[in-house]
Image (cartoon, helix red, strand yellow):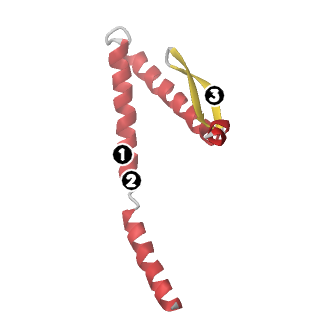
Amino acid sequence: MADQEQEKLLIRLHIYDTDLSVKIPREDEEYYRKSGKLINDIVNSYSKIFKGRKSDKEILYMSLLDIALRYEKESGRNDTAPYHDILTRLTAEIEDTLK
């Protein structure tokens, strides 16, 4: 457990109007920083359009929905099940020929 804690890194992210301290795996730092930037970019885009007409909470929820929609669309494009099936069959064939 101590080894896992040593591999953690404490970073500060500024998300919209909040500073967050986050303890993360060292190898994921770039992903966290890029994610924070993406969140800020999307919230800022919605804020430019809706500030004064929608509450901050509504703008944040619209941003969350935007990010979730992007994630769902992307995950649908990355369906690896067909490749997994082909690789499983090829692996079985290769193993059979080696026997």
Residue in the picture at 37% in, 13% down: 56
Q: Which mark is residue 77?
A: 2
Q: Secondary structure at mark 3?
A: strand
Q: Give the amino acid type for the residue marked by disc 1 in the picture.
A: Lys
State which tag comes first along the sequence, 2 or 3. Answer: 3
Q: Which mark is residue 73?
A: 1
Q: Nearer the viewer, residue 79 or 51?
A: 79
Q: Position of residue 99 (x, y in %)?
A: 51, 91
Answer whether labels 2 and 3 touch (C-beta < 8 Å). no
Q: Give the amino acid type for the residue marked by disc 3 in the picture.
A: Leu
Please state the total of marks drawn on the protein image: 3
**Vertical position of residue 77 compared to residue 36: above or below:** below
Q: Give the amino acid type for the residue marked by disc 2 in the picture.
A: Arg
The 10 Å Cα crowd at callout 1, few under 14, some 14 to 19, many 20 or more, is few
Answer whether labels 1 and 2 touch (C-beta < 8 Å). yes
The 10 Å Cα crowd at callout 3, few under 14, some 14 to 19, many 20 or more, is few
Q: Secondary structure at mark 2?
A: helix
Between the C-alphas of marks 1 and 2, the distance is: 7 Å
**Vertical position of residue 79 compared to residue 85: above or below:** above
Residue in the picture at 31% in, 10% down: 53
Q: Position of residue 18 (x, y in %)?
A: 51, 15
